[in-house]
Amino acid sequence: MAKPMLQVALDTKDLPAAISVARQVNDVVDVIEAGTLLIYEEGLRAVQNLRALCPDNIILADTKTADAGGNVGAECKDAGADWMTCINAATVPTMASAQDKIEVQVELYKNWTEDLAQEWLDAGIDQVVYHQSRDAKLAGQTWGEEDLREVKRLIEMGFKVSVTGGVKPEVLKLFKGVDVYTFIAGRAIHGAADPRKAAQEFKDEIDRIWG
Ligand code: 5RP
């Protein structure tokens, strides 16, 4: 089993803040995410800047695309991203046209089914992000056995599964023995007093559990 990768989600208020965090953590994390909130603020120049700053990292544009997949995919690719996200509510043709341009991750929020997920696989999309939404977390949702079951089910179907949503180092042990592709942490890293130290704590926990 491969060790899970670590991704920092840069949902910062502006580009200088994102660049500052990326500089501190790019040799600790594997994937640098231009977060949805950052893209709303700064557009795809956020992706361009992160690409230039972090040539050795995978760069994800978290666009959560719902339509016009081919157009958004081409824009993300031109900006320097390796991966982009589509929301699970997008149609399969939207996802497939994005996947023609760039590697797509489907972000799972609500109302997806195994039959639909099989259609994504059939369209050549093999990455999903298992997500607890920020708003659900604020309403009290926590990580638990049901999440573990769903993540395992998706891995068994053949997906590379990333896990995100208020993830902190202490959440990781829930997934011991599970072939998680990437753990994605936003506020726990970019909101920390020392983002590099926070990222290293995630990395140390991954090494301890998946050694
Ligand atoms: C928000 C996102 C975030 O990037 C993701 O949830 C990680 O952020 P955090 O660890 O702060 O919850 O996709 O829609």
Image (cartoon, rainbow, N blue to C red):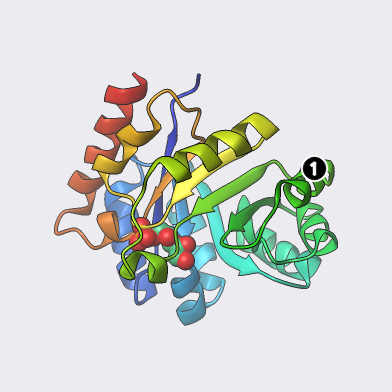
Nearer to the camera, 92 or 145: 145
Element type at marker 1?
loop
Q: Does residue 11 appear to the left or right of 46 in the view shown?
A: left
Which picture quadrant has residue 133? bottom left
Residue 169: give x, y in percent of width and height: 26, 42
Q: Alpha-carbon neighbours of circle 1 within 10 Å: few (<14), some, or many (≥20)?
A: some
Vertical comparison of 157 with 195: above or below: above
User: What residue do we see at 47% from left, 56% from top?
Assistant: 33
Amino acid identity at mark 1: Gly
Q: In this orientation, which residue lies closer to the viewer: 41 or 208?
A: 208
Q: Is residue 76 above or below residue 204?
A: below
- What residue sits right under mark 1 in the picture? 124
Q: Position of residue 118 (x, y in %)?
A: 78, 43
Q: In the figure, is residue 111 to the left or right of 190?
A: right
Image height of 66 relative to 197, above or below:
below
- Which residue lies at the image location 44% right of the left edge and 72% below the top edge? 38
Q: What's the residue at 30%, 42% (across, down)?
A: 171
- Residue furthest to the bottom in view is 41
User: Where does the image place residue 80, in percent across and percent down from the top left?
Assistant: 60, 57
Against 92, is 65 above or below?
Answer: below
Quadrant in which ligand 1 is drawn: bottom left
Q: Is 175 in front, or is 35? A: 175
Q: Quadrant of residue 92?
A: bottom right
Q: Quadrant of residue 69?
A: bottom right
Q: Which residue is rendered at x = 62% and y = 38% of the image?
A: 154
Q: In the image, is 144 to the left or to the right of 199?
A: right
- In the rendered image, the quadrant that contains the C terminus is top left
